[in-house]
Image (cartoon, grey):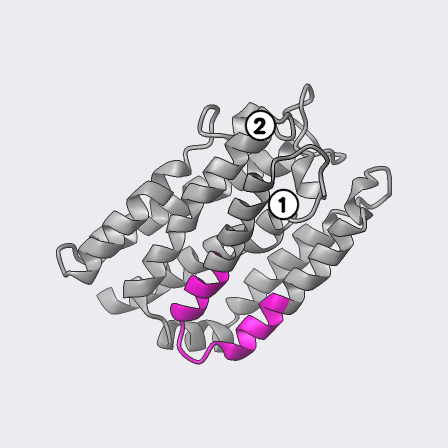
Amino acid sequence: MIENLPNSIYWLFYATIISTLVLFFLSNKNSSKIMIVLVIWCMVQSVLAYRGFYQNTQTVPPRFVLVLFPSTLLIVFGLLPKQRNYMIKNRKLKISTFLHTVRIPVEITLYSLFLHKLIPEILTFGGRNFDIISGISAPIIGYLYLKNKIGVNVLLTWNVICLFLVIFVLCNGILSAELPFQQFGFEQPNVAIKYFPFVLLPALIVPLVIYTHIIDILKLLKVKS
């Protein structure tokens, strides 16, 4: 936990975590086993961060690899043929788009963390984080698709653009953290992600957002063909 950080920021982020998990669950049929894995993953990362494990940045390799590498592996595993086909088959496109509304409270959280000197400005909508566009447009695009006001092509294009935006922010977040390959934010590194519960942003929320985009893109391409 971070000292002198208002409780409102914590509660907003807790709500964002829960909303992400709930929307991901509702977006997929028969996803109970997946949810169990995700909850366990959250618990492991939360305990490590709460105990200060990631605050030691002098180890080789960096301890934060235990966040980034397994998260990447989970995405890759979920894209293997068997798992990918299962997810595409059980995907509810008219719900999954609404998951991206969680990017609005994420952006509010990031800006609040910047004001408390815990992340650099480049990671906020005041810098070069344009992911707020994805969050604001998600409920609009989701509603229009739900009501059959837009077609597959529009939803596909939106997913591709928003996938690029979140990956861009992720790269900036990693490159501004206190890691051996840090490139940005030297005056104010991205230190918030070393602490509970904000470690769950790169450990859970961002990977689920990326995976949701990828699966939706694959599903939409299959619908088009």
Q: Residue at x 71, y 44 (%)?
A: 195
Q: Is residue 29 magenta?
A: yes
Q: For the view shown, which residue lies furthest in the front direction? A: 7
For residue 167, above or below residue 203: above
Between 9 and 157, the one lying in front of the other is: 9
Between 191 and 158, the one lying in front of the other is: 191
User: Can residue 39 be seen?
Assistant: yes
> Which amino acid type is shown beneath numbered disc 2?
Phe
Label 1 sits on a secondary structure element that is loop
Mark earlier in primary sequence (2, 1): 2
Labelled disc at residue 198: 1
Asked if residue 9 lies left or right of residue 225, the reply is: right
Which quarter shows the C terminus? bottom left
- The picture places residue 221, in percent across and down from the top left corner, at 30, 63
Label 2 sits on a secondary structure element that is helix
Estimate how packed mark 2 is, as few (under 14), some (14 to 19) or many (20 or more) residues with alpha carbons within 10 Å.
many
Labelled disc at residue 47: none
Residue occupied by mark 2: 114
Estimate how packed mark 1 is, as few (under 14), some (14 to 19) or many (20 or more) residues with alpha carbons within 10 Å.
many
Q: Residue at x 46, y 24 (%)?
A: 126
Residue segment shown in magenta: 20-39
- The picture places residue 179, in percent across and down from the top left corner, at 74, 36
> Which amino acid type is shown beneath numbered disc 1?
Phe
